[in-house]
Image (cartoon, rainbow, N blue to C red):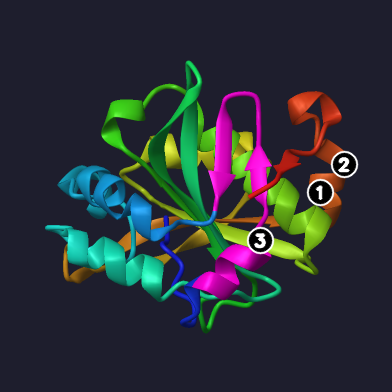
Amino acid sequence: MTTIETTPGAPLAESCIPVLETERLVLRAPRIEDVAAVAELANNRKIAEMTANLPYPYRASDARAFVETLGAAPDAATFAVFLKREGDLAFAGMCSFGRRPPEPAPEIGYWIGEPFWGLGIATEAVRAVIDYAFSETPTEQLIGAARVVNPASRRVLEKCGFQWSGVGLCRVKALGASVPVDRFQLDRRIWASIRAWGAAALPQHRAH
């Protein structure tokens, strides 16, 4: 639901964030060379209206500013999501987690470009990032949110083990208004007890 904002320092962020690999995906820190691809997919009203911080229209300057201001923190990380395609990688979206005051725990957020909808990419990416957050950072709980008019996003959270925790409001930049959302949470102990995806294998780390 949310694009996480972090402190400046892109080179530091990339050096601290591993490359994760799943069956179909590679997740790594966003880079300047990704700007054109990010801008192309993110410039979509259907996506912007379902996220908190994506503006619409979304320009190359927005993508560049996003990449250049990413930072690193013990309980935050932002990954660009790439789909493996016959020896190549196709940029498909973003997945991140980080603390957004006044929330009590890091919030997971994600968006997938429209050409890649319906392929299960969001669920696969979110699972990889959850595994990373709980296995390699001190995170004890993750929270998430989905607009009540976005059942697909809700299903992603539910398939990843999140439990509904109530309703609330979220400010959507593209709409200039607050909208109702369903809120979810996932605790480390629940993750540990239900983690069965990927044949119980954590996502692989690749060299940068």
The residue carrying mark 3 is: 142
The residue carrying mark 2 is: 193
- Tell me where residue 46 appears, x and y as whole percent: 21, 43
Residue under the image location 38 percent in, 72 percent down: 68
Give, as a single range, the part of the protein colored magenta: 11-28
Closest to the observer: 160 or 82?
Answer: 82
Amino acid type, residue under disc 2 in the picture = Ser
- Tell me where residue 30 appears, x and y as whole percent: 46, 56
Lower sequence index among marks 3 and 2: 3
The residue carrying mark 1 is: 190
- Tell me where residue 101 appears, x and y as whole percent: 51, 83
Closest to the observer: 29 or 119?
Answer: 29
Q: Which element is circle 3 on? A: strand
Q: Taking 144 as reference, is 5 above or below it?
A: below
Left or right: where does residue 177 sit relative to residue 115?
left
Amino acid type, residue under disc 3 in the picture = Leu
Tags 3 and 1 touching, CB below 8 Å: no
